[in-house]
Amino acid sequence: MPMDEAPPLRLRRLPTRLLTQTAAHVQRLVAQGLGDFRTHHYALLAAAEERGPSSQAALGRACGMDRSDVVAATNDLAARGLLRRDPAPGDRRSNVITLTADGENALRDLDERVRRLQDSVFAPLSEDERDQLTRLLTRVLRHRAES
Amino acid sequence: MPMDEAPPLRLRRLPTRLLTQTAAHVQRLVAQGLGDFRTHHYALLAAAEERGPSSQAALGRACGMDRSDVVAATNDLAARGLLRRDPAPGDRRSNVITLTADGENALRDLDERVRRLQDSVFAPLSEDERDQLTRLLTRVLRHRAES
DNA sequence: TACCTCTTGTTGGTGCCACCAACGATGGTC
DNA sequence: GACCATCGTTGGTGGCACCAACAAGAGGTA
């Protein structure tokens, strides 16, 4: 175990790199903490619950997901009986996505898993520091929306 | 443009999600700011310059890259004449990776691009806030290494 | 009416990044 | 000499974001 591991100075504190490295690490933990769900699944279940019955397009926009990814995720969730996909009465193009009772239960379970994940991932940070982090990230993200 | 876009409350301030969203956004900007280089390329060039001639394995460890990804990236860089891959004199298993003059020039160019990218990506944050962010991320990352 | 344009869901891709398994060849150790 | 770790390499996987094209339908205007 030589001191090989010292990362290049340029990279050690490079913000963009820190960001992607941390995100990769976090995604890893989240993926295994969510079991046989993906983040897309959680996002769609949450959106469906909060918005009530909606079209796939609306759910996708709310979650910032591409339409094609919405299709795949709703396929998964419908196959597992967690939501229903019915033809929209007023518009023959679109579907109405509705959460089932099983879907609500799954969502509650996921809520709890997600909550625990935040605690485990951000364990080294205090409550205040987590807030700082979310605020900073939010501002960087908002900067995207504005450009 | 309906108010469809309102993201689910659960997701709006969810730290892990903010992190991956921001990282995705940043990676996008970085990718296009780096032109025909990937982040791996920059990492390897930087490591090769700072460490001097090293084996692929050592460079990979320094950059936190998988060996197989090191192979692919060094292939690219060698094909472009930015580094040389010679058999190591003392160990017939390993190669010695050396930066060429062109490689140093490319690295300097990338350094500048990367610097500008930080400014553009984190434009909404003050100098202090960027430091805060890097410190917070570093601590989350260090938490990984310790577990 | 016909025409044009936008939206919806769907299919079938791409690219990047992280990672994993297995292999032959070699080095170091006992 | 046997054993195991390491090196480079090949050939994958999976997740996430994204894109292009399509047919069907909706909405507007001429």
Image (cartoon, coloured by chain):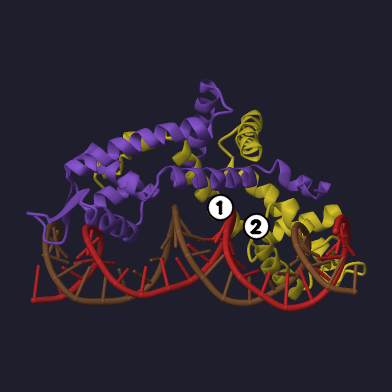
Chain colours: A yellow, B purple, C brown, D red
Q: Position of residue A54 (x, y in %)?
A: 84, 60
Residue drawn at point x = 72 percent, y = 47 percent: B11
Q: Secondary structure at mark 1?
A: helix
Q: Is residue A107 visible?
A: no
- In this view, A50 is above or below A140: below
Chain for numbered disc 2: A
Q: CA distance from mark 2 to mark 1?
A: 9 Å
Q: Which residue is mark 2?
A: A39
Amino acid type shown at disc 1: Gln
Amino acid type shown at disc 2: Thr
Residue drawn at point x = 51 percent, y = 36 percent: B137
- The quarter holding residue A59 reads bottom right
What number of labels is visible?
2
Q: Which residue is mark 1?
A: A27
- In this view, A91 is above or below B58: below
Residue drawn at point x = 16 percent, y = 56 percent: B95
| Cβ atoms under marks 2 and 1 closer than 8 Å | yes
Q: Position of residue C22 (x, y in %)?
A: 32, 76
Q: Nearer the viewer, residue B128 or B111?
A: B111
